[in-house]
Image (cartoon, grey):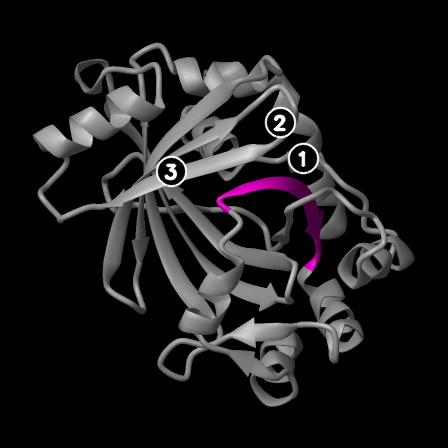
Amino acid sequence: MHFIRYINEELESVSLEEMDAVRLMDRVDTKFICSLSELATLFEMTEGFYRVLAINGKRVLKYMTKYFDTDSFAMYFAHQNGKLNRHKIRERIYIETGTTFLEVKFKNNKNRTIKSRIPRVMDGDSLNESEKEFLAEYSPFKAEELRLTLWNQFNRITLVSDQERITIDFDLGFSKGDDQYMSLPPFAILEVKQNVSSPDTPIMKILNELDITPIGVSKYCMGVASVYPNIKANRIKPVFMKIELMNQ
């Protein structure tokens, strides 16, 4: 992939410690999808404005996520129905650093994303008492009503400036937990994370110039709709159609 060669050879790197100065745990997210062929052009245009996160010499980083939901998929349907003040609960595994966090993402009615997390010790699929207390504090869900509903894996490239983070996720795979991952046609999800929403930053201007427009997309919702074929997924269908069109 040409864009991987470019980010490995051309873009200046930033360390994890340096990037932590721009944590953006309370932020505004704007999401986009694009073809992999568009990424090479995008990365070339960002040179000089952003640095790329590198960990142990790697700039394409592997992630795994386990999502929790209720038996009735309350969190999935809150997103599908466009409900504000909604939550996602997940275990995020950072492969390169060997760290794992239990995370709660809260999307409030002011369109801000607030993320809370605690380190998680790998202990099967059960939650310990401190994790249960964490969920009770940061979500309306009790640990006893949750179950693991989706596993996903993907590769991520992260661009960083003094005020923004841009994550580019690709090679997504989804599973119910049986190690049989379902892959989608090639595409990338871009997420621009800002303290205050602004269309005037370099990345937003570049995306506009490339005619890559914002779209509502959730990896969790895409995964559930992919591996639970009988579940209602009207809201996510335009995303799947766009991915199919860009691969024709």
Kind of element beneath mark 3: strand
Q: Is residue 229 visible?
A: no
Q: Is residue 27 magenta?
A: yes
Point out the stretch of residues depicted in magenta. Answer: 25-35
Quadrant assignment, res 50: bottom right
Question: How many marks on residues?
Answer: 3
Whole-percent x and y of residue 167? Answer: 57, 57
The residue at which mark 2 appears reads as 236
What amino acid type should be assigned to the residue bearing mark 1?
Answer: Val
Q: CA distance from mark 3 to mark 2?
A: 26 Å
The residue at which mark 1 appears reads as 239
Residue 82, numbered label: none
Q: Is residue 13 magenta?
A: no
What amino acid type should be assigned to the residue bearing mark 2?
Answer: Ile
Q: CA distance from mark 1 to mark 2?
A: 5 Å
Q: Nearer the viewer, residue 134 or 180?
A: 134
Q: Nearer the viewer, residue 81 or 152?
A: 81
The residue at which mark 3 appears reads as 116
Q: Nearer the viewer, mark 3 or mark 2?
A: 3
Quadrant showing the N terminus? bottom right
Q: Residue at x 44, y 24 (%)?
A: 87
Q: Main secondary structure of the magenta part?
A: strand
Q: Nearer the viewer, residue 24 or 48?
A: 24
Answer whether labels 1 and 2 touch (C-beta < 8 Å).
Answer: yes
Q: CA distance from mark 1 to mark 3?
A: 28 Å
Position of 168 compared to 90: left or right?
right
